[in-house]
Amino acid sequence: MDFASSIYNYKLFPDFVVGLAAATVPWVEFLAGLCLVLGFKVRGGALAISTLLGVFICLLIISALRGLDVECGCFSGVERRFGWLAIAEDLAMLAGGLFVLFSDRLRLAPASFFAGWRELTRR
């Protein structure tokens, strides 16, 4: 419910979009993060996270230009007002997501790390 009210406070979306976004965005974030951590469909997870971050950065910039003072809705139970620092933080996370998305050989996920380790120890 808090997330839905945070989305509503941006005053950019009709009510049905607010409800739909509040119900789906956390699950998309969770599943994309899980893909990244487990090394399963890493590019898809990175694409989903990067897309969400891009949309959120646009929302923050539009809201800042409109002079709105709203809570960003990033963390449940933590009051965090948005500002240019939040935009910079999200741009840094977007850079990380794009790095993962466009990397050819990424071995950061536990599954690929341990597979690579086993390969090295067999030699």
Image (cartoon, grey):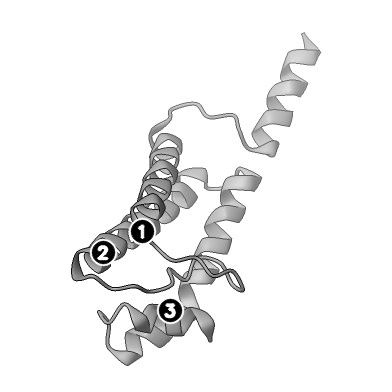
- In the image, which is nearer the foreground, mark 3 or mark 2? 2
Where is residue 55, by image quadrant?
A: bottom left
Residue positioned 32% across, 57% down in the render: 57
Residue 98, percent from left and from top: 38, 40
The span from disc 2 to disc 1 (Cα, nearest Å) is 7 Å
User: Dot 3 corresponds to which residue?
Assistant: 6
Q: Is residue 60 above or below residue 38?
A: below
- Disc number for residue 38: none
Which residue appears at 39% of the width and 39% of the height? Answer: 95
Residue under circle 1? 83
Crowding at mark 3 (Cα within 10 Å: few <14, some 14-19, many 20+): some
Which mark, residue 64?
A: 2
Q: Is residue 19 above or below residue 121?
A: below
Q: CA distance from mark 1 to mark 3?
A: 15 Å
For marks 2 and 1, the one nearer the N-term is 2
**In the foreground, 100 or 11:** 11
Give the label, 1 or 3, closer to the camera: 1
